[in-house]
Image (cartoon, coloured by chain):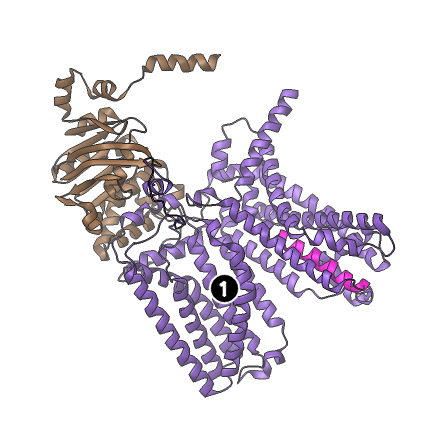
Amino acid sequence: MHDDSAGAKTQFQALYRVFLLRVVDLELLSADADTTRMLGQFAAIFAAVSFALTAPLIIVGGLPKEALWTVEHFLFALTMVVVGLFAVLSWESIFPTRLDLFVLGPLPVRPRLILSAKLAALTAALAISAVALNVFTGLIWPLLFSPPHSGFLGAVRSLGAYWLTVIAASTFIFCCVLSLHGLASQLLPRQQFLRLSIWIQLAALCLLLGAFILEPSLESSAALSAPGNQALLRALPSYWFLGLFQSLNGSMEPVFVPLLRHAYAGLSLAILMSMITLLLAYSRSLNRIVEEPDIVPALRSSGWLRSRKRSVQLPLVLFSIRTVLRSRQHRVLAALFLGLEFAIALVCMQGSPGEHGVLPGSVDGHMPVSFVIAGLLIMIFTILGTRFLFTVPMTLRANWIFRITEFYSPAVYLTMVRRSFYAIAVTPVWLLLSCFTLARCPSWAALAASAVLALVGIIMTDLCLWGFRKLPFACSYSPGNGNLHVVVWGTLFLLIPLIEQAAMAEGTSLQSYAGSALMLSSLGVCAFAVRRQTNRRAHANSKGLLFEDIREEELTSLQLAATPTSSSQRADR
Amino acid sequence: MLELRNICKSFSGIPVVKDVSFSARAGEVTGYLGPNGSGKSTTMKIITGLVDASSGEVFFAGKRIRDDLTRYRQRFGYVPEEPYLYTHLSGLEYLEMVSQLRGLQGRKAAERIDSLLRLLSLHGDRDVPISAYSKGMRQKVLLAAALMHNPDLMILDEPFSGLDIGSALILKSLIQVLAARGKVVLFSSHELETVEQISSRIVILHRGRVVADDSVEHLRTLMSAPDLESIFSQLAIEQDSVAISNQIADLIHA
């Protein structure tokens, strides 16, 4: 008996380590990939956010009670949205893959042990992100949240209450995601579930981000006790955990009592539901995972594609579209970008129509310039997201077929990749936004705005292709090389304000024919120049395509020693 | 003719292919043999241009392949050791992609793919994703992809792996037919009986070096060996297989 439990513990530890390390798909990585560095960059971003949220405290010093409630609520809501996003994005890792089952199936490992190890690994990964996000806020703000005159013990209690609430809120959102996943996998046939999974994920992402951005500020005694707000408060879990914190912190007021009840009931229900659905899903899904392929069966290829005269570029464009549509991993990443774009659109549309003015010809002010800003941001982020998506490989070892068929010049491959960008990112976004704009504002200004959007798409695509020597999904991925933190902060503090300024300038230009004509001609010239430069650079490329993302050598060895040096070894590889 | 001259290859300073030279002629089937880790697949990858040799040159039709790699790539068909394919595509989609990448267009290419799929008994599963294919079916997709452009040189790395008996018989015959039609065929396999049956010439690699390069008949006479298995055992197997099996059995019993 003792040997059995010791054996199970050893098995659990081994599986836990394997599953935790599988946060990053090792099959995709370049030989040079630095996973630790990438994870460190993620943690650094969260810690920096945490620090940025703590800094105002140093400036402000103290805050009135209701302002403190706002901060408390914001911190819990932020934790919930981050943990929720991670849970949704990683929900595929709740179930073992076919490979897991083929490897572990013949071994004497009980399915419930696999489930426990999977859950523990996922929980650990989510806990790391929650801790990183609260590393500064969770140590400094709670000192201010303690009830007045409660002294040192009050501060300690507040600290404990804060972290308990963070754990409870994270557990609630994690369990909700597990329940959603478990229910969907039980109610739908597996192939349908695989097909619809991405849409459920996308809907969950939009719901989380939408709720976070749009939820009203009710952090005052009057708003919390107003009868008209009670239905809303029942529907917003972030407020429940504000109530829980007040209770644990010892600063409970009557307005929080219903919220506290919701918190306990919601948490219990979420845990119960997730356990039931997960156990059901596990007991019923393992065989289906082994028996059925992971990828949705191909639809019969449409005749028009075959009957068309094929251009050299077509195979790569089709390959890119099929990969985005069928690869689970790429669809999840695409969903993340779509969710972020949805959030951007919401943030932009939240402003009042009068803030930036409206487009000429807009009926009843239905087409504010803020929509133009949102459109530009969506177009640019879709292209950047597609650029990132293209660098994440699909079945890396299968890229030998592209290597042995590298018959064309770099310029031809550049055109292939450019068309893939147009097919996946630029055209769908442009069509969607243009139709929406023209439907709401059928005027010359809307036409001009739509032309601007197309030109911006063309320019951004060519900028993304600057020095891009890869084929989509066919080069190994080196996550540590991306300097993720630089990209994130650059986007937040440089790119978004820049786009906002440009969009406002566009809004101003669209107010007159002359302004619109000038803007369109300037963008046209710019698009032509960027295209020309990108093509010129591709023609000058004598190195061919890149299939292995290896960092450029920072040191050059003089190779004075007789033994092989690191650089010569790398050349060997 | 395909010719390798003094090919050497090291990985991280460790030599895996050492001064390998041999040639494979048009109209002949050249069998390339060697134990695991002898450098066979690395040599195959060097021949396809997927891996660069540390030193030495590969020539095809009298020209260095590095001088015009693009032209060379258009002339060979390759079946790799492992069936790495884009499994999210169907068999038909994969072959269409390869044909388009190879510049084959129009009705003729479509008909050729369709016929290959029928002849290799894949037509019924042409729209099923490759992820659902068995190993043998994947091997057939690779074979179809390697053949569709009528290459002058066939490089087959373990082509029989996973094939059922019927398909293996077809492939055996196909290799001989291709050679008879003037193509250069280089193939590696661990199935010595098959290699002996269809190869005109044998190259045996051991620890990265060529230890035999001759016809099977001549090797048999030279080494007084009844068959290829005996020749291979003498040249490339250093261990006493019976002793090792006994040691393994003893170990797991202990």
Reply yes or no: does residue B69 show up in magenta: no
Tell me the crowding category of disc 1: few under 14, some 14 to 19, or many 20 or more residues within 10 angstroms, Cα based: many
Residue B231 in the figure: left or right of residue B16: left
The vertical placement of A62 against A185, above or below, is: below
Give the image location of residue A301, x and y in percent: 35, 55
Of the 4 image quadrants, the one containing the C terminus of chain A is: top left
SS assignment at label 1? helix
Q: Check the residue under mark 1 and report the chain it is in.
A: A
Disc 1 marks a residue whose amino acid type is Phe
The front one of B179 and A247 is A247
- Residue A200 seen: yes
Majority secondary structure of magenta residues: helix
Give the image location of residue B60, x and y in percent: 16, 43
The front one of A287 and B189 is B189
The vertical placement of B236 against A504, above or below, is: above
Reply yes or no: does residue A77 show up in magenta: yes
Give the image location of residue A293, x and y in percent: 45, 42
The front one of B120 and A165 is A165
What is the span of residues highlighted in magenta in the rendered image?
A: A62-84
Residue A33 in the figure: left or right of residue A67: left
Rendering colour (chain B): brown
Residue A101 in the figure: left or right of residue A208: left
Residue shown at the point (38%, 77%) measured from the top left: A524
Q: Which residue is mark 1?
A: A381
The vertical placement of A109 against B26, above or below, is: above
Give the image location of residue A277, x and y in percent: 63, 43
Residue A21 in the figure: left or right of residue A116: left
- Residue B160 seen: no
Chain drawn in purple: A
The front one of B56 and A16 is B56
